[in-house]
Amino acid sequence: MIKLTRNQWCFALVAAGLTAAFHHHLFGFIEEEQWSSIGWYAGGYGVAMFLAGLAFGATDSVAKSRLDLGFGYHAITFVVVLVVGTLAALVYGQPVWPQLLGTAGWAVGLYVHYRMSRRTVKGLDAEEAFP
Amino acid sequence: MKDAPYIEELLQTWEQVHKKGHLSLWVLVALRDEPRYPREISEFVADVAPSMSCEGQSLYRALRRFHDLELVTFSKQKGSRGPDRKVYRLTALGRRVLAAFIDRNIMFLYSRRVRALLEGSDG
């Protein structure tokens, strides 16, 4: 059973809100063929998501180590974007496959992050838990 | 013996690696039978395992980690002079982990076969 910290739950809610707002305006830009605006808008959305993750992660007090916190926030972002993005596409009558295709590629990156993140025990680096 | 300094250097290098993890064992053993203050833990370890160094910072760091891992807990007791002192004891989880560790990693060393191997004739 995966347990999220309080900060991670808050981040998930903020990320869901940002993602829903992003997709709402994104589909509008696509319909009006404002392609140049999409790039700026997507960039702003990405920066906002990253800063939100950084802010909640930096103040996350439960884990004693930051070693696997980064992966946790990355995984939450992945799930939120996948779920909210897919729902938004369905609600706005947009094709779902671009969302799923992008997420498939992202899943590879997420797996790489998982393999590279340090092993921890209750937030402590596993190699330093027993001195 | 001209090899003596080199042998000593090899032994110290090997022992340094070998001792990693032993501090954890002796600190937890020190707390198995009774709660102790950090100074008492240090004295216990020095008495039982003289080759172990259990100095202030490394002991406090170990105790903090064990507390985070829920292996030990502490209560504060009023000092006769100065600030309150922490007295540490094993949790139920700590007892189970320590017993399992000793069973899996220490007790086999006392088997007849292993003792015979370790006491084998010098080549």
Image (cartoon, coloured by chain):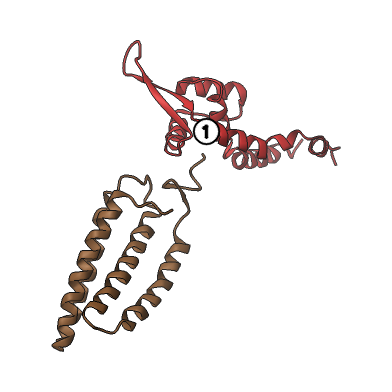
Tell me: B1 left or right of A24.
right
Where is residue B19 drawn, in percent x and y? 60, 37
Where is residue B26 drawn, in percent x and y? 57, 29
What is the residue that sits farthest to the bottom in this orientation? A33
Type of amino acid under label 1: Gly
Residue B94 is at least partly visible in this image? yes
**Residue A89 versus residue B90 in the image, above or below:** below
Chain of residue at mark 1: B
Residue A57 is at least partly visible in this image? no
Tell me: A25 left or right of B96.
left
- Closer-to-camera residue (A92/B48): A92
- Closer-to-camera residue (A92/A23): A92
- Image point (19%, 81%), residue name: A27
Chain in red (letter): B
Where is residue A53 drawn, in percent x and y? 27, 59
Label 1, on which residue? B94
Helix, strand or loop at label 1? It is helix
The colour applied to the residues of chain A in this rendering is: brown
